[in-house]
């Protein structure tokens, strides 16, 4: 893998993902660090780059509601309703993982977190890649996640294959996470979408 010495264009970032290499790119909430789940094999490089212990699940960015049916197992109807309401947007939904989710990407409980981002750059990457992107925030463990290109850590950027940026400042608020793997929504982390919003639609 050749490290990215400067910001790259869309095609370079897409090519790097197809080669199974890690890429920094903008989402609607923060800058993300991700790999193609089809091409990378496992998320270990993300843990290595962030300098954090492995084992914490890495959520996937997906292209739309249909991915819930593909990558989720026995997904309740209310979960599809939540996705149709809040996707694209800052809601990560944890569901039981189907057989289409490679074992290295599943949590120890056999679940997977899915989110369809609102940002056009991230959505275009996912759609043209033809695969979800396992994504975590683009920062070293314990440091503040970047919401602007000038907040990206140069040391981290030097270790990835491509760094894709855009001029827009992100919300800076991480997505709300709900666990729906047990048949009812359980709040894991509250972001810009409140639990009251979720309960009103579940």
Image: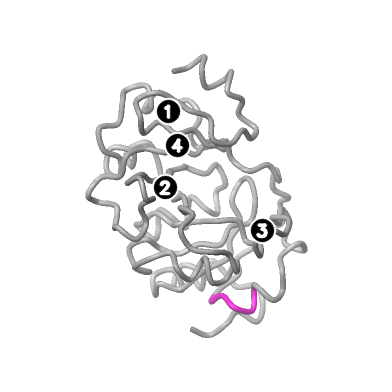
Residue matched to label 2:
62
Residue 165 horizontal/vertical position (percent): 65, 62
Q: Are marks 4 and 1 in contact (CB under 8 Å)?
A: no
Res. 166 mark = 3
- Residue 78 falls left or right of residue 6: left
Residue 182 or 63: which is nearer the viewer? 182
Res. 84 mark = 1
Vertical placement of residue 69 versus 155, above or below: above
Q: Residues within 10 Å of mark 3 (few under 14, many from 20)?
A: some
Q: Indicate whether residue 19 is drawn in magenta.
A: no
Q: Are marks 2 and 1 in contact (CB under 8 Å)?
A: no
Q: CA distance from mark 4 to mark 1?
A: 12 Å
Res. 93 mark = 4
Residue at image location 77% in from the left, 63% down from the top = 150
Dot 2 or dot 4, earlier in sequence: 2
Residue 132 horizontal/vertical position (percent): 39, 54
Q: Look at the magenta stretch and give its main secondary structure.
A: loop
Q: Nearer the viewer, mark 3 or mark 1?
A: 1
User: Farthest residue toward the left?
Assistant: 99
Q: Which residues are magenta?
A: 157-161
Dot 4 or dot 1, earlier in sequence: 1
């Amino acid at each position: 893998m050749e490290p990215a010495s400067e910001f790259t264009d869309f095609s370079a970032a897409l090519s790097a993902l197809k080669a199974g290499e890690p890429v920094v790119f903008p989402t609607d909430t923060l800058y993300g660090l991700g790999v193609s789940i089809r091409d990378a094999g496992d998320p270990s490089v993300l843990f290595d780059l962030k300098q954090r212990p492995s084992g914490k699940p890495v959520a996937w960015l997906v292209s739309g509601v249909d991915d819930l049916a593909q990558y989720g197992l026995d997904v309740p109807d209310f979960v599809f309703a939540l996705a149709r309401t809040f996707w694209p947007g800052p809601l990560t939904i944890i569901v039981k993982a189907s057989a289409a989710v490679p074992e290295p990407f599943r949590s120890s409980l056999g679940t997977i977190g899915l989110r369809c981002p609102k940002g056009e750059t991230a959505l275009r990457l996912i759609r043209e890649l033809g695969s979800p992107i396992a994504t975590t925030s683009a920062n070293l463990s314990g440091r503040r996640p970047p919401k602007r290109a000038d907040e990206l850590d140069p040391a981290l950027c030097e270790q990835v294959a491509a760094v894709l940026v855009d001029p827009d400042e992100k919300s800076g608020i991480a997505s709300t996470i709900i666990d729906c793997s047990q048949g009812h929504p359980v709040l894991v982390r509250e972001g810009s979408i409140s639990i009251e919003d979720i309960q009103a639609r579940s």
